Image (cartoon, helix red, strand yellow):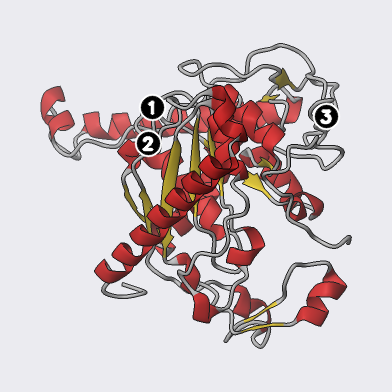
Amino acid sequence: MADAKVIPFDDDRSRGGAGGAGGAAQRPARRRGAGSRRHGAGTAAMGDVQPLPGRTPVGDDAPVPRESREPRAEHDGGAAASGAAPGTESGAGDEAGGLEQRVASGLAFLRRRLTGDYAVDDFGYDEELTDQVLMSLLRPMYEKYFRVEVKGIENIPSEGGALIVANHSGTLPLDGLMMQVAVHDNHPADRHLRLLAADLVFMLPVVNELARKLGHTLACAEDAARLLEQGELVGVMPEGFKGLGKPFADRYKLQRFGRGGFVSTALRARTPIIPCSIVGAEEIYPMIGNARTVARLLGFPYFPLTPTFPWLGPLGAIPLPTKWTIQFGEPIHTESYPPEAAEDPMLMFNLTDQVREQIQHTLYKLLVQRRSVFF
């Protein structure tokens, strides 16, 4: 494998052949992104995604609408309203009807998958697969294993583009995935978060395809700008591998945020910047060493040594069940700045520092409030 590298987010260059992923198949309530396409029975395989520009959209069909989630069961009010006590034939009939509906929905989903009658957008994002399968696979880890507590979800706008900027840690990028589930499951407008990822993600087999289906795209200014213009929520972790692979001794100390490329992109798109602080990810794989020689041989930015990996083999790759908190801070608005502000290096430096300091301050605040790493 070629040496992994982080695509500088502030480098306004074309994508080339890196093969990103992302760009939402929009829900009707939101502005529909250009170039969504539907797979037909005789079309290419699921992973065939044309590169952006020059990626050429295939077809203009609207995406398959998102299947509505099952409503939460009401406690006793629903039974009382129907005139039937819990456990009566009416309740059993409702349960049977709900089961039949879920089975029918599942069979319809499988039929669409087998016949190719589903939509992906120009980036390869598959909204239906994300909602019905991928989020369902991530949700037990989010709810039961890491027991994520979400704060400040009201700071994310209900519509329009916004750039969520978060700290990055944990040796493996599980924090980005948990942040996606947090937005997906808690935002009242059912919004999706589109993450910007390093090119290493799109060089790994299987991981590449899953990242595309989840809506991830290459971390370059061009793709971020296009997503923001389409009214998407875009997530970026400016620390990159510097934050993800930092030693355990430096936990919760933010690394360098780059040269402010994410600020420049937000200023050009005139979208708010939302700082996000994640506590709990630092301890899932305590990185006590780095086997640099092995990392170079494998083409990785680092090869972690933890108290359990690689000493325990595959068991050492199981993350520790820490308790997480994800807090979305108050947005930093960019609408009032003139168009030429994106070219002002001093302004970009100041806004970058403001975002970084807000995330760091919130991390310290959450750590003070935390009573236990695991409980």
Secondary structure type for disc 3: loop
Residue 26 at x, y percent in the picture: 56, 22
Q: Eyeballing the image, is 54 above or below 88?
A: above
Q: Amino acid at mark 1?
A: Ser
Of the two numbered discs 1 and 2 in the rendering, the one whose residue sits closer to the viewer: 1
Residue 179 at x, y percent in the picture: 48, 49
Q: Please tell me in which quadrant of the rendered image residue 360 appears.
A: bottom left
Of the two numbered discs 3 and 1 on the same chain, state the one appearing first in sequence: 3
Question: Dot 2, crowdedness within 10 Å: few (<14), some or many (≥20)?
Answer: some
4 or 270: nearer the viewer: 270
What residue is pinned by disc 2?
187
Q: Residue at x 62, y 43 (%)?
A: 261
Of the two numbered discs 1 and 2 on the same chain, state the one appearing first in sequence: 1
175 or 96: nearer the viewer: 175
What residue is pinned by disc 1?
158
Q: Amino acid at mark 2?
A: His
